[in-house]
Image (tube, coloured by chain):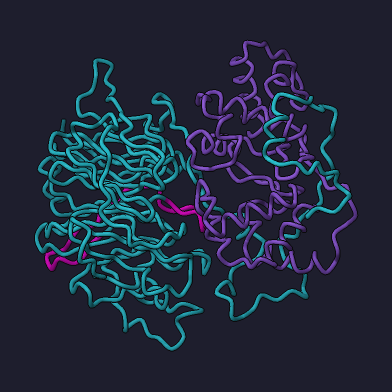
Chain colours: A cyan, B purple
Amino acid sequence: MTPASRPTRNRGFAAALACLGLGTLAPGLSRAQETKASSAPPASVQIDRGSALYGRPEGGDAAKLAPVAGPPLATAAAKLPLDKLKVPEGFKVEVYASGLANARSMTQAPDGTLFVGTRTVGKVYAVLPQAGSDGKREVKTIASGLHRPNGVAFHDGALYVAELSKIWRYDDIAKHLDGSEKPSLVYDDLPKDEAHGWKFIAIGPDNKLYVPVGAPGNIVMPPDTHAQIRRIDLDGKNAEVIARGVRNTVGFDWNPKTKQLWFTDNGRDWVSEDIPNDELNVLTEPGKQHFGYPFCHQGTFTDPEYGWGHSCTEFTAPAALLGPHTASLGMRFYTGAQFPEGYKDAMFIARHGSWNRTTKLGGDVVVARPGPDGKVASVEPFLTGFLQENKYAGRPVDVLVAKDGSLLVSDDYNGAIYRVSYGQ
Amino acid sequence: MRLGVRIGLIRGLASVLGVPLAGAALAAPDAAMQERLAPCVACHGGGASETEGVPSLGGQQADYVVTQLFQFREKQRTAPPMNDVAAGFSDDDLRAYADAVATLPPPAWSGPAADPALVTRAQALVSKHQCNSCHGADLAGRDAIPRIRAQREEYLARALTAYKSNDRPGYDPAMNEVAQGLSEADIQDLAAYVSRL
């Protein structure tokens, strides 16, 4: 408690209420001289070598890096950074919908209705497929007050929504876009950690629900319940762990040919500007593979803390590297017919953009093309321009191949959805 | 650049209030803004709070205040009476109040200097947990990251405790992540030290 040097009116909540509407502003106070809180410890202070935080940079340039959470209010349509966005020759990018604060993961119903989850504002949106006479699509809020409802998946007329530790099903959602449907609880045997607790979800070709559980921190030894992907029956039963050593995947999809699960994974922070890379992984033997965290990162780099006694050969190496700290999130195979032949079965990957790096990297959508052997042959920029002079004009989160073959891209910084189309 | 933005925001506020802003100095809120702030100031003080459990708002980052008011309105953060206060706010109200609050003078510690042993322990914690990474070298915050220097001690301790238990899910969960590594003693040290800056 504060010592007597600061006058204290020790009153409770009722008193706080009572003082609303009373009192006056004291405008004459001047800004006091501010002393520095040391950005580096005194020489005598040592970080415990056994700490997982040992080796993190202290002060200096590294101390200028911070995560960037987008604002809770959406950017007005007229102020979206559309003129800054670049796509390859022959493609066109336009605003598909705006006013969806913190728009994150997407799923689409057969009638074209787009459902969009959020991470920070507790809402799930529905974007109606037909634009009005003003060219704008109506956005309905179908749920609010949820806890980090990042994940959405449409299946058989129902919308599955993943909160941080609960998965819900909204039946016959098309008839309940006004938010009147009371959801049924599908599954809640999930940890409640905030760190990497928000979830991307999807329903696989096997009609099962795929649910990741991230590591409960940047670099920690995860409990058996964490750093994994689970597969669950649609009624919430028979949960099984199908992949381990996964730090935090926020996007996955199934190869249309092999039906194998491919997923992005975000690498650890603070070890270096340039390593480790985020990973693109493929699950070939469900339940049997470990993808490295916290022992090995990017398939080649043993962790400075947890890697001792291990070799990266013990773990499944990534199928492709996606750049250091790029926050590679949503990814989908291109299964549409609108784009040129070279995009068939290629993967589009949204890179949210780095914060744990002096020169930001990512803030784009890249395309990973498969070679004849099915392995990733190249990773190239596709939609760029969100990163301007080391600042974000927007941040892509998820990609979705729309029913008409165009590519939808969500931007949680501006609360908008863009549409990339070809030859129209 | 930042100054330009701030002036723009204040002009925006003035137009919301229907008051012309003819060359008003930034540090001297006009009468309409004072009126708008009066209910805030009643509990939170004119920059520095003198009420236990009620945080000081002076010099707070406008983007952070917008986010907190949004969370109060949406009931994402439970902090009576603020949930009721913000319940009827429009998005424009959130911005206007945040811009107004940001003009209040920041709190400053005026008591005796912190105990050197406390300073040593707390500075090691500040370094270990990368507080400066986000809150800045002087812990005055930036953008959506709050000013915490010279904040009330018991408020800081309560915030850290609630982040640790996840009773207060941050707008972004960065603080929930950081607080997992704090002991009860760490929290007391950090709160005592940061409140005395």
**Is A62 left, or right, of A206 in this rendering?**
right
Q: Quadrant of the N terminus of chain A?
A: bottom right
Residue nearer the viewer, B45 or A367: B45
In this view, the residue in front, A410 or A170, is: A170
Task: Classify A25 as above or below B132.
Answer: above
The answer to whether residue A143 is above or below residue B124 is above
Q: Is residue A121 left or right of residue B49?
A: left
Which residues, given as a range, are shown in magenta?
A: A353-378
**Residue drawn at x 52%, y 52% as measured from the top left:** A67
Residue A92 quadrant: top left
What predominant SS class does the magenta segment belong to? loop
Residue A356, x across and y down, in percent = 51, 58
Q: Which of the 4 image quadrants contains residue A294? A: bottom left
Q: Is residue A363 one of those drawn in magenta?
A: yes
Residue at coordinates 40% horizontally, 30% vertically from top-left?
A: A80
Residue A47, x across and y down, in percent: 66, 75
Residue A72 spot, x, y in % from top left:
48, 37
In this rendering, the count of numbered labels is 0
Taking the magenta stretch, the answer to whether it contains residue A138 is no
Residue at x 46% of width, y 77% of height: A303
Residue A393 in which image quadrant: top left
Q: Relative to B144, is B5 above or below?
A: above
Residue A107 horizontal side relative to residue A390, left or right:
left
Residue extending farthest to the front is: A14
